Image (spheres, rainbow, N blue to C red):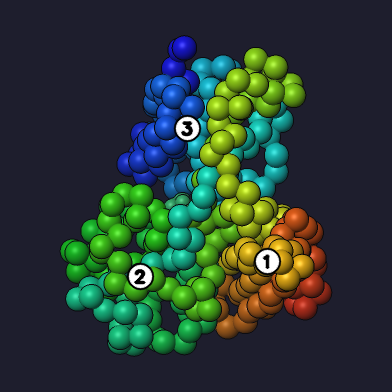
């Protein structure tokens, strides 16, 4: 049988997560997988990402290659995937999630609480910046860009005292040993979808020839992860309709005991913050795992009613 073509960006993180998925597909189905490097505008340009439509430029290039039939499937970081569906494509699998939490990499092995007031902490994420500011520890939040290696180097070079990154990215790059503290979601709620991957292919409903690829990928799907990220993304989509402030969200499946007549549940926590961290709306909700998306929509609606929409208005004021 001919090899399946997996389109990937050339970055270390993209190749490592694509290779991980390729290995799982081969393990599960015996099919060979060949990595095809797709160069995107975001990879070749030095212009700020935001000016090219944000991380969406990476996703679009892979999706175009899928629709053009140049590749058979692609792997995305779920947190970088727009919440809207892509016509003609389908998420065949959401594999078991890596640790979704954020991680601190600080000088001298320090944890967050040990970094003195005035310490410089780097992040490019408004969500991380707002939550760090909300802790009120007097740290100076410095906006940084670049790939994981570049960001870590700012700590080794002494330019910054610490950086905050997704733990999952560091694990995938084999650099988890540099983490000095994995941040508790009570202090730092991760981005919706963080730590999870989406494996995308052409939709067999619109392209029957894709049925074979879809079937090969399906076995990688982890229903627990899929439900958790479905809730986080439904929440994000609902909030995006009413508010553009930074959002953190984490869904955690809770396995019920069938002998006690319990169903599986999902515990969803979320926060919407003012960029400067001075105000936040924070809520949680638990409900049946099978209604994950509805839990996300309901929680978002409650948060908007509780003032999350006002946080956005303060942003634009
Ligand atoms: N924003 C960029 C990005 N997109 C995906 C990851 C890796 C973590 C993941 O897969 O969720 C990262 C790096 C980071 O946020 O530190």
Along the line of sight, the residue nearer the viewer: 128 or 202: 202
Give yes or no for contact between labels 3 and 2 (Cβ–Cβ under 8 Å). Answer: no
Would residue 285 be found to the left or right of residue 150 on screen? right
Using the rendered image of the protein, determine whether residue 138 is visible from the camera's viewpoint. Answer: yes
Mark 1 to mark 2 CA distance (whole Å): 33 Å
Residue 104's disc is 2
**Relative to residue 112, is residue 40 drawn left or right?**
right
Q: Where is residue 179 in the image (x, y as percent from the top left)?
A: 30, 67
Q: Which of marks 3 and 2 is in front?
A: 3
The residue tagged 3 is: 28
Crowding at dot 2, Cα within 10 Å, few <14 / some 14-19 / many 20+, comes out as many
- Asked whether, in this view, residue 88 is left or right of residue 32, the answer is right
Q: Is mark 2 on a helix, strand or loop?
A: strand
Question: Picture coordinates of residue 202 (x, y %)?
Answer: 63, 25
222 lies left or right of 240: left
For mark 1, give the secondary structure: loop
SS class, disc 3: helix
Between the C-alphas of marks 1 and 3, the distance is 28 Å
Residue 256, labelled with which disc? 1
The image quadrant of residue 235 is bottom right
- Splitting the image into 4 quarters, where does residue 42 fall? top left
Q: Which residue is drawn at 47% across and 32% down?
A: 28
Is 156 above or below relative to 217?
A: below
């Amino acid at each position: 049988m001919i090899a399946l073509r997996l389109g990937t960006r050339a970055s270390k993180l993209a190749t490592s997560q694509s290779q991980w998925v390729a290995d799982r597909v081969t393990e599960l189905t015996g099919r060979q997988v060949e990595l095809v490097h797709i160069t995107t505008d975001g990879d070749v340009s030095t212009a700020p990402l935001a000016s090219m439509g944000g991380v969406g430029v990476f996703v679009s290039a892979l999706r175009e290659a899928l629709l053009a039939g140049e590749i058979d499937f692609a792997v995305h970081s779920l947190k970088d995937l727009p919440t809207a569906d892509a016509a003609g494509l389908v998420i065949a699998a959401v594999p078991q999630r890596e640790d979704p939490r954020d991680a601190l990499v600080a000088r001298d092995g320090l944890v967050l609480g040990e970094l003195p007031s005035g310490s410089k902490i780097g992040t490019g994420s408004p969500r991380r910046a707002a939550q760090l500011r909300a802790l009120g520890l007097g740290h100076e939040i410095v906006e940084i860009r670049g790939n994981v290696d570049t960001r870590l180097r700012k700590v080794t070079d002494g330019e910054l005292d610490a950086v905050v990154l997704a733990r999952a990215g560091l694990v995938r790059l084999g650099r988890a040993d540099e983490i000095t503290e994995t941040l508790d979601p009570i202090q730092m709620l991760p981005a919706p979808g963080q730590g999870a991957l989406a494996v995308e292919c052409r939709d067999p409903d619109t392209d029957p020839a894709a049925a074979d690829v879809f079937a090969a990928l399906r076995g990688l799907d982890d229903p627990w992860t899929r439900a958790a990220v479905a809730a986080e993304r439904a929440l994000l989509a609902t909030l995006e309709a009413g508010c553009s402030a930074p959002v953190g969200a984490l869904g955690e499946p809770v396995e019920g005991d069938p002998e006690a007549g319990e169903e599986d549940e999902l515990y969803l926590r979320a926060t919407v913050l003012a960029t400067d961290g001075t105000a936040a709306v924070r809520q949680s909700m638990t409900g049946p795992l099978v209604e994950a998306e509805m839990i996300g929509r309901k929680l978002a609606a409650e948060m908007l009613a509780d003032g999350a929409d006002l946080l956005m208005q303060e942003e634009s004021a």
